Amino acid sequence: MQLRWLGTAGFELGSGTTTILIDPYFTRNPKAKPEQRLKPQDFPHAQAVLLTHGHFDHSFDVPAVVQLSGAVVYASPLACQSLAAKGVPWNRLRPCWGGESAEVGPFRLTAVPARHVTFDAHLVLSTAWKCLPHLADLARLGTTHYPCGQVLGWYIEVEGKRLFDMGSASLPWDLDREVDVFMVPVQGRTDICSVAADLVARIKPAVVIPQHYDDFYPPLSRYVDLAPFEEELRKRGLQVQVRVPTINKLMEI
């Protein structure tokens, strides 16, 4: 199976002739790092899109992806409603609360109820100060237009492998399933490296792929140095392989 990080919380998963996208977000601003040169037009072969939640950096490009590929979208009811309002046909939407499973080609997909990370006061204040000159631009990307909805994690079984992906770093319940590869988000708090390491300790995967650590829409976002995250893993004595992805580069899993 091949996996490709698309920046932010986005992934492309491929097995045989089946391609699935998770939180595909391409439309960054010119100051974003790393640069994302791919566009929805590069994914006419996608058969399904999994959404972890409805915020703009997860769902903005989904209508274009569906229009070009005809992919089916699995997302929370509120995220589906928001996408329908943006032109996604209802017959392309599959509302999920969590606990439901579906099969797409060789992939078995299970929605796992999760929560959005709680922003801490220091991060909120520092980000708000930087964003003041850009309020007009950022207002169109706010939760009024892109509501979060129920947050979902995705447990994915394919080719004898078990993957677990989260789009935001809060899981209020234990995951009672074995995980080989955990795609963990590292964004949303000043102590996010510790928060993400705690999630790894709970999930106990063999391999961890950090994601969402890029500066995807400055000044709203920030680049997160992953060295403290790896140090937090060592402090907890976790024997886990860390595979830091390069944007748009294929990885064999």
Image (spheres, rainbow, N blue to C red):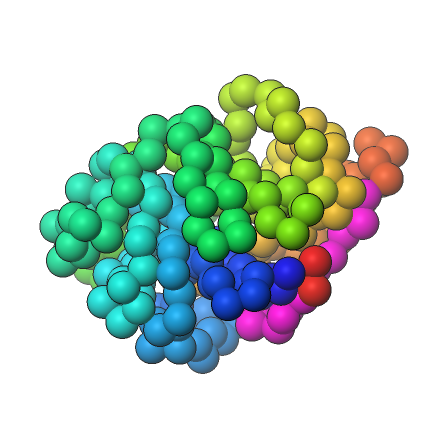
Q: What residue do we see at 74% from left, 33% from top?
A: 204
In the image, taking residue 51 as reference, residue 252 lies left or right, namely: right
**Can you say whether 239 is above or below 159 in the image?**
above
In the image, taking residue 175 as reference, residue 55 lies left or right, namely: left
Q: What residue do we see at 23% from left, 43% from top?
A: 80
In front of the other: 208 or 214 = 208
**Can you say whether 158 is above or below 33 in the image?**
above
Please check the rendered image and state whether residue 202 is part of the magenta-colored stretch, yes or no.
no
Please check the rendered image and state whether residue 241 is part of the magenta-colored stretch, yes or no.
yes
Visible residue check, residue 152: yes
State which quadrant residue 144 falls in: top left
Q: What residue do we see at 40% from left, 71% from top?
A: 45
Visible residue check, residue 166: no
From the top left corner, tell me how far across and down residue 239 is, in percent. Answer: 86, 39
From the top left corner, tell me how far across and down residue 12 is, in percent. Answer: 51, 62
From the top left corner, tell me how far across and down residue 148 is, in percent. Answer: 31, 39
For the record, the magenta segment spans: 240-251
State which quadrant residue 244 falls in: bottom right
